[in-house]
Image (tube, helix red, strand yellow):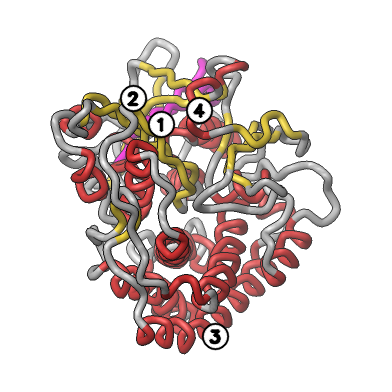
Amino acid sequence: MKREILIDPVTRIEGHAKITIYLDDAGEVNDAHFHVTELRGFEKFCEGRTLWEMPALTARICGICPVSHILASAKTGDAILAVRIPKAAELLRRLMNTAQFVQSHALSFFYLSAPDFLLGWDSDPAQRNVIGLIGANPSLARKGIRLRSFGQQIIERLGGKKIHPAWAVPGGVNSSLSKEDVDFIKANLPEALDTIRGTLDLFKSSFADEQTRGMLSDFPSLFMGLVSPDGTWEHYEGNIRIVDSQGSIVVDQFDPAHYPEIVQEASEGWSYLKFPHYAPLGYPEGMYRVGPLGRVNVCDRFGTPLADAELEEFRAGSQERSGRVFDYHYTRLIEILASLERMERLINDERIRSPRIRAEAGINELEGVGIHEAPRGTLFHHYKVDSDGVIQWVNLIVSTGQNNLAMNRSIKEIAQQHIHGGKFDEGILNRIEGGIRAFDPCLSCSVHAVGQMPLLVELQTPDGETVGRLIRD
Protein backbone atom coordinates (compact mmCIF):
# COMPACT_ATOMS: atom_id res chain seq x y z
CA MET A 1 0.00 0.00 0.00
CA LYS A 2 1.32 3.45 -0.84
CA ARG A 3 1.83 5.52 2.28
CA GLU A 4 1.31 8.89 0.60
CA ILE A 5 -0.48 10.01 -2.54
CA LEU A 6 -0.32 13.63 -3.68
CA ILE A 7 -3.40 14.85 -5.53
CA ASP A 8 -3.87 18.01 -7.57
CA PRO A 9 -5.79 20.46 -7.86
CA VAL A 10 -6.71 22.04 -4.54
CA THR A 11 -9.74 20.91 -2.66
CA ARG A 12 -13.07 22.37 -3.73
CA ILE A 13 -14.24 23.51 -0.31
CA GLU A 14 -14.04 26.97 1.23
CA GLY A 15 -11.21 26.43 3.66
CA HIS A 16 -8.82 23.65 4.64
CA ALA A 17 -9.32 20.51 6.68
CA LYS A 18 -7.91 17.16 7.71
CA ILE A 19 -9.74 13.85 7.74
CA THR A 20 -8.55 10.82 9.70
CA ILE A 21 -10.08 7.44 8.96
CA TYR A 22 -9.51 4.76 11.61
CA LEU A 23 -9.29 1.10 10.56
CA ASP A 24 -9.83 -2.06 12.59
CA ASP A 25 -7.58 -5.12 12.43
CA ALA A 26 -9.32 -6.34 9.27
CA GLY A 27 -8.75 -3.06 7.45
CA GLU A 28 -12.40 -2.02 7.74
CA VAL A 29 -13.41 1.51 8.73
CA ASN A 30 -14.08 1.86 12.43
CA ASP A 31 -14.41 5.65 12.72
CA ALA A 32 -13.63 8.93 10.94
CA HIS A 33 -12.89 12.45 12.15
CA PHE A 34 -13.18 15.75 10.31
CA HIS A 35 -10.49 17.95 11.90
CA VAL A 36 -10.21 21.72 11.74
CA THR A 37 -6.94 22.76 13.30
CA GLU A 38 -6.66 26.53 12.85
CA LEU A 39 -6.89 29.06 15.68
CA ARG A 40 -10.28 30.49 16.64
CA GLY A 41 -9.93 34.19 17.43
CA PHE A 42 -12.68 36.52 16.22
CA GLU A 43 -14.82 36.31 19.34
CA LYS A 44 -11.92 37.49 21.48
CA PHE A 45 -10.50 40.30 19.41
CA CYS A 46 -13.96 41.83 18.95
CA GLU A 47 -13.87 42.58 22.68
CA GLY A 48 -13.13 46.23 23.33
CA ARG A 49 -14.55 47.41 19.98
CA THR A 50 -17.83 49.31 19.76
CA LEU A 51 -21.22 47.98 18.75
CA TRP A 52 -21.24 50.28 15.71
CA GLU A 53 -18.09 48.63 14.35
CA MET A 54 -19.37 45.09 14.61
CA PRO A 55 -21.17 44.65 11.25
CA ALA A 56 -18.11 45.75 9.27
CA LEU A 57 -15.71 43.95 11.61
CA THR A 58 -17.46 40.56 11.66
CA ALA A 59 -17.95 40.76 7.89
CA ARG A 60 -14.18 40.27 7.66
CA ILE A 61 -14.59 36.77 9.04
CA CYS A 62 -15.10 35.65 5.46
CA GLY A 63 -15.00 36.92 1.89
CA ILE A 64 -17.75 34.53 0.78
CA CYS A 65 -20.18 35.12 3.66
CA PRO A 66 -19.76 38.83 4.54
CA VAL A 67 -23.42 39.66 3.88
CA SER A 68 -24.51 36.94 6.30
CA HIS A 69 -22.38 38.32 9.14
CA ILE A 70 -23.26 41.94 8.36
CA LEU A 71 -26.98 41.22 8.61
CA ALA A 72 -26.72 39.04 11.74
CA SER A 73 -24.53 41.66 13.42
CA ALA A 74 -26.86 44.50 12.46
CA LYS A 75 -29.81 42.56 13.87
CA THR A 76 -27.88 42.07 17.12
CA GLY A 77 -27.33 45.83 17.16
CA ASP A 78 -31.07 46.39 16.64
CA ALA A 79 -31.73 44.32 19.77
CA ILE A 80 -29.22 46.28 21.85
CA LEU A 81 -30.62 49.60 20.63
CA ALA A 82 -34.10 48.15 21.32
CA VAL A 83 -35.47 49.58 18.09
CA ARG A 84 -37.87 48.44 15.44
CA ILE A 85 -36.19 49.30 12.17
CA PRO A 86 -38.17 51.04 9.38
CA LYS A 87 -40.03 48.73 7.02
CA ALA A 88 -37.97 49.87 4.05
CA ALA A 89 -34.78 48.86 5.89
CA GLU A 90 -36.19 45.41 6.61
CA LEU A 91 -37.20 44.93 2.97
CA LEU A 92 -33.80 46.09 1.78
CA ARG A 93 -32.01 43.71 4.14
CA ARG A 94 -34.23 40.91 2.88
CA LEU A 95 -33.37 41.83 -0.70
CA MET A 96 -29.65 41.68 0.00
CA ASN A 97 -30.06 38.33 1.72
CA THR A 98 -31.88 36.85 -1.28
CA ALA A 99 -29.01 38.07 -3.46
CA GLN A 100 -26.56 36.43 -1.04
CA PHE A 101 -28.49 33.14 -1.30
CA VAL A 102 -28.34 33.29 -5.10
CA GLN A 103 -24.62 34.06 -5.34
CA SER A 104 -23.50 31.71 -2.57
CA HIS A 105 -25.65 28.74 -3.62
CA ALA A 106 -24.61 29.24 -7.25
CA LEU A 107 -20.95 29.24 -6.19
CA SER A 108 -21.42 26.01 -4.24
CA PHE A 109 -23.31 24.18 -6.94
CA PHE A 110 -21.75 25.31 -10.22
CA TYR A 111 -18.17 25.97 -9.14
CA LEU A 112 -17.55 23.45 -6.35
CA SER A 113 -19.90 20.51 -6.87
CA ALA A 114 -21.13 20.29 -10.46
CA PRO A 115 -17.73 19.04 -11.71
CA ASP A 116 -18.35 15.81 -9.76
CA PHE A 117 -21.83 15.34 -11.20
CA LEU A 118 -21.02 16.17 -14.79
CA LEU A 119 -17.42 15.01 -15.13
CA GLY A 120 -17.55 12.01 -12.81
CA TRP A 121 -16.26 11.22 -9.34
CA ASP A 122 -13.34 9.24 -10.78
CA SER A 123 -12.44 11.66 -13.58
CA ASP A 124 -9.00 13.25 -13.88
CA PRO A 125 -8.63 15.59 -10.86
CA ALA A 126 -6.67 18.02 -13.03
CA GLN A 127 -9.85 18.54 -15.07
CA ARG A 128 -12.43 17.98 -12.34
CA ASN A 129 -13.04 21.64 -11.56
CA VAL A 130 -14.91 24.63 -12.92
CA ILE A 131 -12.42 25.04 -15.77
CA GLY A 132 -13.01 21.45 -16.81
CA LEU A 133 -16.75 22.05 -16.53
CA ILE A 134 -16.47 25.03 -18.87
CA GLY A 135 -14.79 22.79 -21.41
CA ALA A 136 -17.30 19.95 -21.04
CA ASN A 137 -20.51 21.98 -20.81
CA PRO A 138 -19.81 25.63 -21.66
CA SER A 139 -23.47 26.62 -21.82
CA LEU A 140 -24.26 25.37 -18.30
CA ALA A 141 -21.03 26.80 -16.88
CA ARG A 142 -21.69 30.20 -18.47
CA LYS A 143 -25.22 30.27 -17.09
CA GLY A 144 -23.99 29.35 -13.62
CA ILE A 145 -21.34 32.07 -13.69
CA ARG A 146 -23.91 34.65 -14.83
CA LEU A 147 -26.37 33.55 -12.14
CA ARG A 148 -23.79 34.04 -9.41
CA SER A 149 -22.78 37.38 -10.94
CA PHE A 150 -26.40 38.53 -10.82
CA GLY A 151 -26.50 38.00 -7.07
CA GLN A 152 -23.16 39.73 -6.60
CA GLN A 153 -24.21 42.72 -8.68
CA ILE A 154 -27.30 43.26 -6.55
CA ILE A 155 -25.14 43.19 -3.41
CA GLU A 156 -22.80 45.71 -5.01
CA ARG A 157 -25.65 48.02 -6.05
CA LEU A 158 -27.12 48.00 -2.55
CA GLY A 159 -23.92 48.08 -0.51
CA GLY A 160 -21.41 49.79 -2.79
CA LYS A 161 -19.22 46.73 -3.32
CA LYS A 162 -19.61 42.98 -3.75
CA ILE A 163 -17.49 41.98 -0.77
CA HIS A 164 -17.64 43.52 2.71
CA PRO A 165 -20.22 46.22 1.91
CA ALA A 166 -20.46 48.71 4.80
CA TRP A 167 -24.23 48.94 4.46
CA ALA A 168 -26.37 47.29 7.14
CA VAL A 169 -25.94 48.98 10.54
CA PRO A 170 -27.63 48.82 13.93
CA GLY A 171 -31.00 50.45 13.37
CA GLY A 172 -31.29 49.88 9.61
CA VAL A 173 -29.20 50.41 6.49
CA ASN A 174 -27.08 53.21 5.06
CA SER A 175 -28.56 53.66 1.58
CA SER A 176 -31.78 53.17 -0.38
CA LEU A 177 -32.64 51.34 -3.57
CA SER A 178 -32.58 53.50 -6.69
CA LYS A 179 -34.93 53.26 -9.65
CA GLU A 180 -31.95 52.19 -11.76
CA ASP A 181 -31.31 49.33 -9.34
CA VAL A 182 -34.95 48.21 -9.57
CA ASP A 183 -34.81 48.35 -13.36
CA PHE A 184 -31.59 46.31 -13.38
CA ILE A 185 -33.10 43.58 -11.21
CA LYS A 186 -36.31 43.45 -13.21
CA ALA A 187 -34.38 43.25 -16.49
CA ASN A 188 -32.17 40.36 -15.32
CA LEU A 189 -34.61 38.30 -13.27
CA PRO A 190 -36.09 36.40 -16.27
CA GLU A 191 -32.68 35.07 -17.30
CA ALA A 192 -31.87 34.05 -13.72
CA LEU A 193 -35.20 32.24 -13.37
CA ASP A 194 -34.69 30.44 -16.68
CA THR A 195 -31.22 29.34 -15.57
CA ILE A 196 -32.29 27.87 -12.26
CA ARG A 197 -35.39 26.18 -13.67
CA GLY A 198 -33.27 24.62 -16.42
CA THR A 199 -30.65 23.52 -13.91
CA LEU A 200 -33.30 21.94 -11.69
CA ASP A 201 -34.67 20.03 -14.67
CA LEU A 202 -31.18 18.80 -15.57
CA PHE A 203 -30.43 17.83 -11.99
CA LYS A 204 -33.68 15.94 -11.52
CA SER A 205 -33.40 14.10 -14.82
CA SER A 206 -29.76 13.10 -14.31
CA PHE A 207 -28.91 12.98 -10.63
CA ALA A 208 -32.05 12.85 -8.49
CA ASP A 209 -32.72 9.08 -8.70
CA GLU A 210 -32.87 7.16 -5.43
CA GLN A 211 -29.47 5.50 -5.85
CA THR A 212 -27.62 8.75 -6.59
CA ARG A 213 -29.39 10.68 -3.83
CA GLY A 214 -28.23 8.09 -1.28
CA MET A 215 -24.62 7.86 -2.42
CA LEU A 216 -23.17 10.43 0.03
CA SER A 217 -24.76 8.72 3.04
CA ASP A 218 -28.29 8.79 4.42
CA PHE A 219 -28.98 8.93 8.13
CA PRO A 220 -31.64 10.29 10.52
CA SER A 221 -31.15 13.45 12.55
CA LEU A 222 -32.92 16.52 13.80
CA PHE A 223 -33.20 19.52 11.47
CA MET A 224 -33.34 23.20 12.43
CA GLY A 225 -34.29 26.43 10.68
CA LEU A 226 -36.38 29.58 10.94
CA VAL A 227 -40.02 29.64 9.91
CA SER A 228 -42.69 32.32 9.87
CA PRO A 229 -45.66 32.04 12.28
CA ASP A 230 -47.59 29.95 9.74
CA GLY A 231 -44.67 27.63 9.03
CA THR A 232 -43.54 29.25 5.77
CA TRP A 233 -39.84 29.11 4.78
CA GLU A 234 -38.02 32.10 6.24
CA HIS A 235 -34.55 33.52 5.68
CA TYR A 236 -34.43 36.77 7.65
CA GLU A 237 -36.94 36.81 10.51
CA GLY A 238 -39.07 34.11 12.07
CA ASN A 239 -38.64 31.75 15.00
CA ILE A 240 -36.78 28.49 15.44
CA ARG A 241 -38.38 25.19 14.45
CA ILE A 242 -36.78 21.78 14.95
CA VAL A 243 -38.19 18.62 13.39
CA ASP A 244 -37.09 14.98 13.55
CA SER A 245 -36.46 12.61 10.67
CA GLN A 246 -40.12 11.68 10.55
CA GLY A 247 -41.16 15.30 10.11
CA SER A 248 -42.61 15.55 13.61
CA ILE A 249 -42.13 18.94 15.24
CA VAL A 250 -39.82 18.83 18.27
CA VAL A 251 -39.59 22.59 18.89
CA ASP A 252 -41.76 25.24 17.25
CA GLN A 253 -41.86 29.04 17.24
CA PHE A 254 -39.00 29.23 19.71
CA ASP A 255 -37.74 32.75 20.41
CA PRO A 256 -34.17 32.97 19.01
CA ALA A 257 -33.18 35.32 21.85
CA HIS A 258 -33.34 32.31 24.18
CA TYR A 259 -31.34 29.95 21.97
CA PRO A 260 -28.95 28.85 24.83
CA GLU A 261 -31.87 26.89 26.27
CA ILE A 262 -31.90 24.55 23.26
CA VAL A 263 -28.46 24.93 21.63
CA GLN A 264 -25.26 24.10 23.48
CA GLU A 265 -21.70 23.68 22.26
CA ALA A 266 -19.33 20.81 23.00
CA SER A 267 -15.67 20.50 22.07
CA GLU A 268 -13.20 17.74 21.23
CA GLY A 269 -9.44 17.77 21.54
CA TRP A 270 -8.96 16.85 17.88
CA SER A 271 -10.72 19.89 16.35
CA TYR A 272 -11.08 23.62 16.95
CA LEU A 273 -14.50 23.46 15.33
CA LYS A 274 -17.09 23.21 18.09
CA PHE A 275 -19.99 20.76 18.15
CA PRO A 276 -23.33 22.53 18.66
CA HIS A 277 -26.16 20.17 19.54
CA TYR A 278 -29.76 20.13 20.73
CA ALA A 279 -29.33 20.57 24.48
CA PRO A 280 -32.23 18.41 25.76
CA LEU A 281 -30.74 15.33 24.04
CA GLY A 282 -27.15 16.12 25.02
CA TYR A 283 -23.93 15.46 23.15
CA PRO A 284 -23.59 13.77 20.69
CA GLU A 285 -27.15 12.43 20.60
CA GLY A 286 -28.48 15.95 19.94
CA MET A 287 -27.06 16.10 16.41
CA TYR A 288 -29.04 18.39 14.12
CA ARG A 289 -28.55 19.80 10.63
CA VAL A 290 -29.01 23.29 9.25
CA GLY A 291 -28.72 24.85 5.80
CA PRO A 292 -30.75 24.17 2.65
CA LEU A 293 -31.74 20.65 3.68
CA GLY A 294 -32.54 21.79 7.22
CA ARG A 295 -34.72 24.70 6.07
CA VAL A 296 -36.58 22.64 3.47
CA ASN A 297 -37.20 19.89 6.02
CA VAL A 298 -38.60 22.22 8.68
CA CYS A 299 -40.86 24.44 6.57
CA ASP A 300 -44.45 23.71 5.54
CA ARG A 301 -44.22 25.69 2.32
CA PHE A 302 -42.08 28.24 0.50
CA GLY A 303 -44.96 30.61 -0.11
CA THR A 304 -44.02 31.15 -3.77
CA PRO A 305 -45.61 29.13 -6.60
CA LEU A 306 -42.56 27.75 -8.41
CA ALA A 307 -40.66 26.77 -5.28
CA ASP A 308 -43.78 25.26 -3.73
CA ALA A 309 -44.20 23.04 -6.79
CA GLU A 310 -40.58 21.93 -6.46
CA LEU A 311 -41.06 21.26 -2.74
CA GLU A 312 -44.06 19.06 -3.47
CA GLU A 313 -42.02 17.07 -5.99
CA PHE A 314 -39.06 16.82 -3.60
CA ARG A 315 -41.28 15.34 -0.89
CA ALA A 316 -43.36 13.15 -3.23
CA GLY A 317 -44.01 9.67 -1.96
CA SER A 318 -42.73 10.13 1.58
CA GLN A 319 -44.01 11.71 4.77
CA GLU A 320 -40.51 11.54 6.27
CA ARG A 321 -37.89 14.24 6.01
CA SER A 322 -34.89 13.54 3.80
CA GLY A 323 -31.71 12.51 5.59
CA ARG A 324 -29.72 12.20 2.37
CA VAL A 325 -26.59 14.34 2.38
CA PHE A 326 -26.72 14.55 -1.42
CA ASP A 327 -30.07 16.34 -1.08
CA TYR A 328 -28.22 19.41 0.14
CA HIS A 329 -27.49 20.01 -3.56
CA TYR A 330 -31.11 19.44 -4.56
CA THR A 331 -32.50 21.79 -1.89
CA ARG A 332 -29.82 24.37 -2.65
CA LEU A 333 -31.21 24.70 -6.17
CA ILE A 334 -34.78 24.95 -4.87
CA GLU A 335 -33.71 27.76 -2.53
CA ILE A 336 -32.17 29.71 -5.41
CA LEU A 337 -35.54 29.52 -7.15
CA ALA A 338 -37.38 30.62 -3.99
CA SER A 339 -34.93 33.50 -3.47
CA LEU A 340 -35.49 34.78 -7.00
CA GLU A 341 -39.25 34.63 -6.51
CA ARG A 342 -38.95 36.51 -3.21
CA MET A 343 -36.65 39.03 -4.89
CA GLU A 344 -39.29 39.73 -7.51
CA ARG A 345 -41.89 40.40 -4.81
CA LEU A 346 -39.57 42.67 -2.88
CA ILE A 347 -38.72 44.98 -5.76
CA ASN A 348 -42.42 45.31 -6.58
CA ASP A 349 -43.23 46.37 -3.01
CA GLU A 350 -43.49 50.17 -3.06
CA ARG A 351 -42.41 50.39 0.57
CA ILE A 352 -38.88 49.35 -0.36
CA ARG A 353 -38.29 52.75 -2.01
CA SER A 354 -39.08 54.77 1.13
CA PRO A 355 -36.26 57.16 2.19
CA ARG A 356 -36.86 56.23 5.86
CA ILE A 357 -34.26 53.50 6.28
CA ARG A 358 -32.74 53.95 9.73
CA ALA A 359 -33.91 54.24 13.34
CA GLU A 360 -31.67 56.35 15.56
CA ALA A 361 -31.15 55.29 19.18
CA GLY A 362 -28.53 54.82 21.86
CA ILE A 363 -27.63 51.84 23.99
CA ASN A 364 -30.84 50.61 25.64
CA GLU A 365 -29.96 46.98 26.36
CA LEU A 366 -26.66 45.48 27.47
CA GLU A 367 -27.16 42.19 25.63
CA GLY A 368 -28.57 41.24 22.27
CA VAL A 369 -28.99 38.28 19.94
CA GLY A 370 -29.22 38.50 16.16
CA ILE A 371 -30.24 35.46 14.15
CA HIS A 372 -31.08 34.91 10.53
CA GLU A 373 -30.52 32.33 7.83
CA ALA A 374 -27.20 32.43 6.02
CA PRO A 375 -27.02 30.32 2.86
CA ARG A 376 -25.21 27.59 4.79
CA GLY A 377 -27.70 27.64 7.68
CA THR A 378 -28.87 29.41 10.81
CA LEU A 379 -26.40 32.03 12.05
CA PHE A 380 -26.28 33.35 15.63
CA HIS A 381 -24.56 36.53 16.78
CA HIS A 382 -24.72 37.18 20.53
CA TYR A 383 -23.10 40.27 22.10
CA LYS A 384 -22.81 41.78 25.55
CA VAL A 385 -21.85 45.48 25.84
CA ASP A 386 -21.29 48.06 28.52
CA SER A 387 -23.32 51.27 28.85
CA ASP A 388 -21.14 52.95 26.22
CA GLY A 389 -21.73 50.19 23.70
CA VAL A 390 -18.24 48.70 24.03
CA ILE A 391 -18.21 44.96 23.37
CA GLN A 392 -17.55 42.88 26.49
CA TRP A 393 -18.31 39.38 25.16
CA VAL A 394 -19.17 37.74 21.84
CA ASN A 395 -20.46 34.34 20.85
CA LEU A 396 -20.83 33.30 17.22
CA ILE A 397 -22.54 30.04 16.31
CA VAL A 398 -22.21 29.55 12.59
CA SER A 399 -23.78 27.11 10.18
CA THR A 400 -20.72 24.96 9.55
CA GLY A 401 -20.28 24.33 13.26
CA GLN A 402 -23.88 23.25 13.62
CA ASN A 403 -23.35 20.70 10.84
CA ASN A 404 -20.14 19.42 12.42
CA LEU A 405 -21.58 16.26 13.94
CA ALA A 406 -23.39 15.46 10.70
CA MET A 407 -20.28 16.04 8.57
CA ASN A 408 -18.35 13.59 10.73
CA ARG A 409 -21.18 11.07 10.44
CA SER A 410 -21.25 11.49 6.65
CA ILE A 411 -17.54 10.90 6.02
CA LYS A 412 -17.60 7.86 8.28
CA GLU A 413 -20.47 6.30 6.35
CA ILE A 414 -18.92 7.08 2.95
CA ALA A 415 -15.58 5.64 4.05
CA GLN A 416 -17.31 2.50 5.37
CA GLN A 417 -19.04 2.11 2.04
CA HIS A 418 -15.89 2.36 -0.09
CA ILE A 419 -12.84 1.33 1.97
CA HIS A 420 -12.40 -2.40 2.56
CA GLY A 421 -9.30 -4.30 3.51
CA GLY A 422 -7.44 -1.02 3.92
CA LYS A 423 -7.50 -0.32 0.18
CA PHE A 424 -8.33 3.11 -1.22
CA ASP A 425 -7.62 5.38 -4.17
CA GLU A 426 -8.08 8.98 -5.33
CA GLY A 427 -11.70 8.41 -6.33
CA ILE A 428 -12.48 7.40 -2.76
CA LEU A 429 -10.89 10.62 -1.51
CA ASN A 430 -13.12 12.59 -3.84
CA ARG A 431 -16.24 10.83 -2.59
CA ILE A 432 -15.25 11.54 0.99
CA GLU A 433 -14.67 15.16 0.03
CA GLY A 434 -18.05 15.09 -1.66
CA GLY A 435 -19.68 14.29 1.66
CA ILE A 436 -18.10 17.41 3.16
CA ARG A 437 -18.66 19.47 0.02
CA ALA A 438 -22.41 18.82 0.10
CA PHE A 439 -22.65 20.81 3.33
CA ASP A 440 -20.78 23.69 1.64
CA PRO A 441 -18.68 24.29 4.76
CA CYS A 442 -17.08 27.66 5.31
CA LEU A 443 -14.21 27.00 7.66
CA SER A 444 -13.09 30.62 7.95
CA CYS A 445 -16.55 31.44 9.33
CA SER A 446 -16.54 28.51 11.70
CA VAL A 447 -13.05 28.77 13.16
CA HIS A 448 -11.75 32.10 11.83
CA ALA A 449 -8.72 30.45 10.23
CA VAL A 450 -5.18 31.75 10.09
CA GLY A 451 -2.63 30.17 7.81
CA GLN A 452 -3.26 27.30 5.41
CA MET A 453 -3.56 23.57 5.58
CA PRO A 454 -4.20 21.02 2.84
CA LEU A 455 -6.93 18.44 2.92
CA LEU A 456 -5.26 15.39 4.46
CA VAL A 457 -6.89 11.97 4.71
CA GLU A 458 -5.13 9.50 7.00
CA LEU A 459 -5.87 5.81 7.60
CA GLN A 460 -4.83 4.51 10.99
CA THR A 461 -4.73 1.03 12.48
CA PRO A 462 -6.14 0.35 15.97
CA ASP A 463 -2.68 0.82 17.52
CA GLY A 464 -2.37 4.31 15.97
CA GLU A 465 -0.03 3.46 13.09
CA THR A 466 -0.66 5.55 9.97
CA VAL A 467 -0.85 3.11 7.07
CA GLY A 468 -1.92 5.47 4.34
CA ARG A 469 -2.25 9.14 3.55
CA LEU A 470 -4.00 11.08 0.83
CA ILE A 471 -2.99 14.73 0.58
CA ARG A 472 -4.26 17.66 -1.44
CA ASP A 473 -1.75 20.52 -1.32
Q: Are marks 2 and 1 in contact (CB under 8 Å)?
A: yes
Amino acid, disc 1: Phe
**Which disc number belongs to residue 259?**
4
Q: Which is nearer the N-term, disc 3 or disc 4?
A: 3
Other residues around mark 1 within 10 Å, as few (<14) / some (14–19) / many (≥20): many
The percent coordinates of residue 279 (x first, y second) are: 55, 18
Distance from Cα at disc 1 to Cα at disc 4: 26 Å
Amino acid, disc 4: Tyr
Please say whether residue 133 is visible from this viewpoint.
Answer: no
**Residue for point 56% across, 79% down:** 193
Identify whether 226 is placed above or below 187. above
Amino acid, disc 3: Pro
Q: Are marks 3 and 1 in contact (CB under 8 Å)?
A: no
Which secondary structure lies at badge 2? strand
Query: Could you say which is closer to the camera, residue 470 or residue 449?
Result: 449
Q: How many marks?
A: 4
Does 204 appear in magenta? Answer: no
Q: Which residue is mark 1?
A: 34
Amino acid, disc 2: Ser
**Residue for point 61% across, 63% down:** 334
Other residues around mark 2 within 10 Å, as few (<14) / some (14–19) / many (≥20): some
Which secondary structure lies at badge 3? helix
Identify whether 181 is placed above or below 223. below
Quadrant in the picture for residue 463: top left
Query: Could you say which is closer to the camera, residue 167 or residue 104?
Result: 167
Distance from Cα at disc 2 to Cα at disc 1: 8 Å
Residue that extends furthest to the top in the rendered view of this protein: 463
Q: Which is nearer the N-term, disc 3 or disc 1?
A: 1
Distance from Cα at disc 3 to Cα at disc 1: 41 Å
**Which disc number belongs to residue 9?**
none
**Residue for point 26% across, 25% down:** 393
Q: Which residue is mark 3?
A: 190
